[in-house]
Image (cartoon, rainbow, N blue to C red):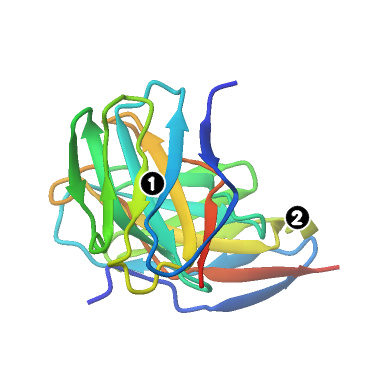
Amino acid sequence: AQKITQTQPGMFVQEKEAVTLDCTYDTSDQSYGLFWYKQPSSGEMIFLIYQGSYDEQNATEGRYSLNFQKARKSANLVISASQLGDSAMYFCAMREEETSGSRLTFGEGTQLTVNP
Amino acid sequence: DGGITQSPKYLFRKEGQNVTLSCEQNLNHDAMYWYRQDPGQGLRLIYYSQIVNDFQKGDIAEGYSVSREKKESFPLTVTSAQKNPTAFYLCASSILSGVEQYFGPGTRLTVT
């Protein structure tokens, strides 16, 4: 079974609107972390946001927020007020701290296009 | 400035040749990682190391080898045994108990 599932290969959003990128995960660990990374066409991976499994509040970082629903095993990324520079590939990743230590498992990504 | 450097950015090799990709970090991180990315796909872990002179296989280690003789360096050798070596290779590092992995700019390897 896939540990990280991103069901949206591509998403389109109008500039200044909000967009939600979906991520579901599968783990039996009690302690784990969820990450979102952005990859522009240049290829570098840019860390956006982190949510720990024991964090009660949803993580927020500027225009990025993580909608963490533990019972549903989902960790969706919400980008508010989209900008043209947000066009990129977005990856959800998980660290299973009990079984895998510091290793990250990545989903297959969602290509976001922001239209002017 | 602190960071991770990978060189070269583009690398071309003939089939049957071994090739070594370099990864250097000056962040004083204990852990280092190598990932492979194929077009339109996510990252897959090749090898990782949490301490000098020790490393572990990731999910797709076959056809690759690594060494960790210094804390700041974690070179990856793509051997001729790797059946489909053409890919984008990313190196990352982190502190052992840290949240974030910091990534280098990547090396695009093309084998013909």
Of the pair B8 and A103, the residue shown nearer to us: B8
Q: Left or right of B34: which side holds B88?
A: right
The spot of residue B50 in percent (x, y) is 23, 34
Circle number at residue B47: none
Label tally: 2
- Viewport quadrant of the N terminus of chain A: bottom left
The three-letter code of the residue at mark 1 reads Gln
At 52% from the left and 74% from the top, the residue drawn is B40
On the image, the x and y values in percent for residue B59 come to 24, 62
**Quick one: label 1, few (<14), some, or many (20+) residues within 10 Å?**
many
Quadrant the C terminus of chain A occupies: bottom right
**Which numbered dot is residue A85?**
2
Mark 1 or 2, nearer chain start:
1
Residue A13 spot, x, y in % from top left: 72, 71
Taking depth in this image into account, of B17 and B96 the one nearest to the observer is: B17
Frontmost residue, B67 versus A111: B67
Residue at x-position 57% and y-position 66%: A20
Q: Is residue A58 visible?
A: no
**Chain of the residue where label 2 is placed in the rendered structure:** A
Is the residue marked by circle 2 packed among few (<14), some (14-19), or many (20+) residues within 10 Å? Answer: few
Q: Residue at x 53, y 67 (%)?
A: A21
- Mark 1 or mark 2, which is nearer to you? 2
- Residue drawn at x 65%, y 57% is A40
Q: Secondary structure at mark 2?
A: helix
Disc sitting over residue A51 in the figure = 1
Do the dots labelled 1 and 2 sit on one chain? yes
> Is residue B71 toward the left or the right of residue A78 in the image?
left
Residue A80 rendering spot, x and y as whole percentages: 67, 56
The image quadrant of residue B94 is top left
Q: Is residue B44 above or below residue A30?
A: below
Is residue B29 at least partly visible in the picture? Answer: yes
